[in-house]
Image (spheres, grey):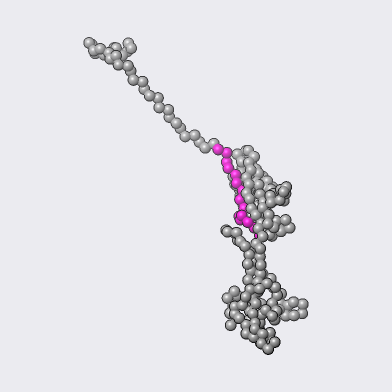
Amino acid sequence: MFNILRTLRRGQKASKRPQQQRKFVPRLEFLENRLAPSVSVLTNQSDYLPGATALINASGFDPGTAVQFQVVKTSVTPAVVESTWSVTDGSAADSDGALNGSVGTSWYVDPSFSLDASFTLTAIGLSGGVSKSASAIFTDSNPNLNSFQDGNSIGVINGNPFGGPYTNPGSWINGDLNSQKAQYFEGMAVPFETVFSTTPNTTYTLTIGYNTTKATTHAFDYLTSYDFNNT
C-alpha cells in the first residue's frame, strides 16, 4: 500500500474500490504421441481354394526382429495348431526383403485338412521393445464345383438315334455323353460348363484337363475357344 500511496497526487484520495485480481489462464501444450507402435498381420485374400498359397504380411514390428507366425484351425473343437514358424525381418526368408519391420511370408493351404475350414493367423514379435501380437482370420471354402456337358438332344427316327436332328444349343447334363444324349460330327465342338460358388473380392483359378483317347477309343482332338460356332 505504501508504494501505491506515493504515486497519488497531493490531495487525491486513494480509491477504496477493491483491486481486481488478475485471472490465471492456464496454457496447455500438446503432448507428443507416446502410444506404442501398432502391429498388424494381413493375408492377400480372405478365402482360399484347397491347394492355394496364402501370402502373408506382418508390419509394425522392430526392424530386424524375428516374427513368429502361427495358423490355428478354429472350425473344429478343440482348435488345432496347423503350423508354427518364424521369419526374421530383412532375412532371406523375408519376402519383403527390407530391414523395415515388415515381414512377408506364405502358407500352403493343404487340401488334406483345409477344406471348408476357418483359420486364425497370429503374428508375434517385438514392437517398441515390447512383445506385441496381431491376428487375422481366413477361410478355405468348398466352391461346390459342378461340370456339365452340352447334350444337344437328338430325335430318334426309325429307331436310329443318329437319324434325328440335333439342337443348338442343347441342355446342360451331368455324366458322359452318349448316343442317347447327343449328336456330334467331325469338326464340331462339345461345350462344357463349370458352375461353382464364389466369395466377393476373391480370385479363382480353374485348371482344365482332357484326354484325347479313352482306352483305345479316340475322344477329343483339341480345345477350342468359348465362342466356337457349331453351325
Q: Could one spot residue 173 in this view of the protein?
A: yes
Picture layout, residue 113 above or below residue 216:
above
Q: Is residue 53 visible?
A: no
What is the chief secondary structure element of the magenta stretch?
Answer: loop
Question: Residue drawn at (68%, 89%), measured in percent from left and top?
Answer: 158
Q: Position of residue 134 (x, y in %)?
A: 62, 45
Looking at the image, which residue sits at the far bottom? 158
Please give left or right for residue 117 compared with residue 24 in the image: right
Q: Position of residue 156 (x, y in %)?
A: 67, 85
* The one of 110 and 132 positioned closer to us in this rendering: 110
Which residue is rendered at x = 66% and y = 87% of the image?
157
| Front residue of 24 and 103 | 24
Which span of residues is magenta-colored?
Answer: 35-49
Q: Is residue 158 left or right of residue 27?
A: right
Residue 198: percent from left, percent from top:
61, 61
Does residue 204 lie above or below 153 as drawn?
Answer: above
Q: Of residues 48 and 8, which is closer to you in this image?
A: 48
Q: Is residue 187 above or below residue 61?
A: below
Q: Among all residues in the image, which is located at the extreme right? A: 215
